[in-house]
Image (cartoon, coloured by chain):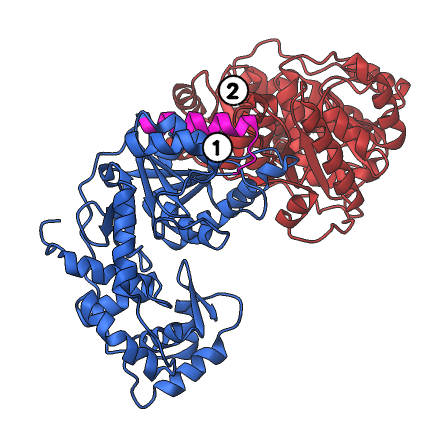
Chain colours: A red, B blue
Amino acid sequence: MPDTPPITEAEMLSRLRLARSRRVGATTFHRLLAEHGSAAAALAALPAIARAAGAEGYEPCPEGVARAELAAGRRAGARLLPFGAPGYPPALADLDDAPPLLWALGDPALAARPMVALVGARNASSLGLRMAQRLARELGAAGFTVVSGLARGIDAAAHEAALATGTIGVQAGGIDVVYPAENATLSARMAREGLRLAELPPGTQPQARHFPQRNRIIAGLARATVVIEAAARSGSLLTARNALDYGREVMAVPGHPMDARAAGCNLLIRDGAVLVRNAEDVIEALGGSAPVASGPAPLPVAAPVQSPLPGPETGAAEARILAALGPSPTPEDLLLRSLGLAPAVLARSLVLLEIEGRVIRHPGGLLSLG
Amino acid sequence: MPDTPPITEAEMLSRLRLARSRRVGATTFHRLLAEHGSAAAALAALPAIARAAGAEGYEPCPEGVARAELAAGRRAGARLLPFGAPGYPPALADLDDAPPLLWALGDPALAARPMVALVGARNASSLGLRMAQRLARELGAAGFTVVSGLARGIDAAAHEAALATGTIGVQAGGIDVVYPAENATLSARMAREGLRLAELPPGTQPQARHFPQRNRIIAGLARATVVIEAAARSGSLLTARNALDYGREVMAVPGHPMDARAAGCNLLIRDGAVLVRNAEDVIEALGGSAPVASGPAPLPVAAPVQSPLPGPETGAAEARILAALGPSPTPEDLLLRSLGLAPAVLARSLVLLEIEGRVIRHPGGLLSLG
């Protein structure tokens, strides 16, 4: 990315502090950065923004905490990839909720190649595991980096089979936290021969609420997400949903309707996902030719947004947003249309409400009451 | 069918003779009947038509042969259903190649209800057999007559499970020929509690070339053909093809890509067939509501066609048709467009060429060199 000015050590630290500040999600991070020009400026403005929103005593993430995280990452042998810097995965660059920073262990060049995500059940059948291995091997041979979540079952089978050609494991917890324990050997090999990525700070133990965040990164990295075996309500379907939201291809391996592990896949196919029998089906659906290693995609230039400092009518906009939202997540674009607010007004109000903790952002542009 | 004049015994015999005459396929039968107003008149014209086409010594089916067939059918306890007569399945009435006659054993009223065909592999898996039984039972309970081919495997399982609600078995050989032998008990029950239909004369042993003809009847009877388990190149896929040609729904039960018995079904789904997990999926794709027993559909009135006696330019048209056709079947409508002949001229020439044995008609409006 020759056109991007290098990120100084000080700015890197500020970005880390901004990203780790309470109520600052990925989308808010990018908005604040665009509005204030630098993470340092955004950090300086954050207490006033919070105060204006009625959140007294708001403190951004202290510098010491960020320094400690940097030290922990270095101890783990990992490298911090800030959004927009060299090594940051180009495929994530155009996502509204791209991770502000990623900890990386291994070869970041693997993320510059075209990627396919192979995801599926932890309690996979032997047929499912064989399918994961075969697809991983064949897609790897065709030039794709295979992305998955380093979980048991389908994930582990796909990573193992793609170690020789290139594979990326996206972790729900910290880069130095091996989970599950049975994947310790695989995890170690992934760091040496592949690439491991983690959005959360080193030391973070993965919890249920972290998995949707991690799944969005898998979906965002890959041109296509292929679901290999998945029950009706499973995390793999949420990853597929992320992929759809990001405009990526969703594909699924069918199974017999009497096999519960096929229910999610068959549902996706009924809903329009590409039916996958083999790697050729995936390659054909992606345009028919083996991938060519692409250079990094150009970074999007964030549009300038008005200052989030509250103007006279902000209170009214916030009240309308709160009235329109409920506990179950609603797409932001739907909210925009139904309220008829100017996008800049909505954006500003949402930043305030999010910092205040009254609105929660979910992956895929969804909002709910906090 | 109150508006259809009753068919006399003599006309019935003539229809049987016309249908059994060499080179007179189902489509030609309907054309000759429409052109000549009655089977007797068409029979009388047949030798001249053949002579004009250069086939010397052509003889229509002798009356004695037809009488012997009628006697054999009666001995079997079967009833002859001529096209357009009461009891003839309304669903077949609008097909170009509707069977001129059908031998029936059992209750023809079952063919006046909405039908779903369940077809699939003879060497089905236990999962496939269970799926056939479940779909047959649930579709039967929803008011559909279940149609199949009385073969081993999927067919037999579907018939068995639908005996209580109504099922039709279409036979490739004669109505009195039980094939395969292991289905003897099922066949006997089908005659008593369901309906068996056969297009070919009693006593005919089913041969490989008879199955495509039989499959078109299955596809033609049913609103939807559901393929339950089928290898990549199998008769069930041809039945599905017939259903598409007839404008009926094609549906398939998915299976794991590593199971060869799922290959045909997965192929159909990739090509746009409805993915079927259960009876609700079938019913939903057919319009979402359980069927209402429908009265017989109105019979189509065949358009008057010019006399097939050769005019001065017929020879040229025939030569062009023969030049355009090859050994592999071509759709008639494609031939019509590519030759730019008037439909009546093409129809007349094809009757001649077919009687002459130089052109063969295949199910689904396909033509090839004889």
User: Could you tell me which residue is drawn at 68 percent across and 47 percent down?
Assistant: A280
Chain to which the residue tagged by mark 2 belongs: A
Q: Is residue A309 left or right of residue A187?
A: left
Within-10-Å neighbours for mark 1: few <14, some 14–19, many 20+: few
The residue under label 2 is which amino acid type?
Answer: Leu
Q: Which residue is mark 1?
A: B182
Query: In the displayed structure, does residue A359 sit left or right of residue A147?
Result: left
Task: Decide: few, some or many residues near mark 2? Use Cα within 10 Å; few <14, some 14-19, many ≥20.
Answer: many
Q: Residue at 31% x, 24% y: name it.
A: B164
User: Which tag is nearer the camera, tag 1 or tag 2?
Assistant: 1
Badge 2 marks a residue whose secondary structure is: helix
In three-dimensional space, the C-alpha distance between marks 1 and 2, rounded to whole angstroms, equals: 73 Å
What mark, if any, has residue B151 been given in the picture? none
Three-letter code for the amino acid on which mark 1 is drawn:
Glu
Left or right side of B204 for A23:
right
- What's the magenta region? B121-140
Q: Is residue B236 above or below residue A82?
A: below
Pinpoint residue B310: horizontal percent, then vertical percent: 30, 84
Q: Nearer the viewer, residue A277 or B135?
A: B135
Task: Give the image location of residue B329, x and y in percent.
Answer: 49, 65
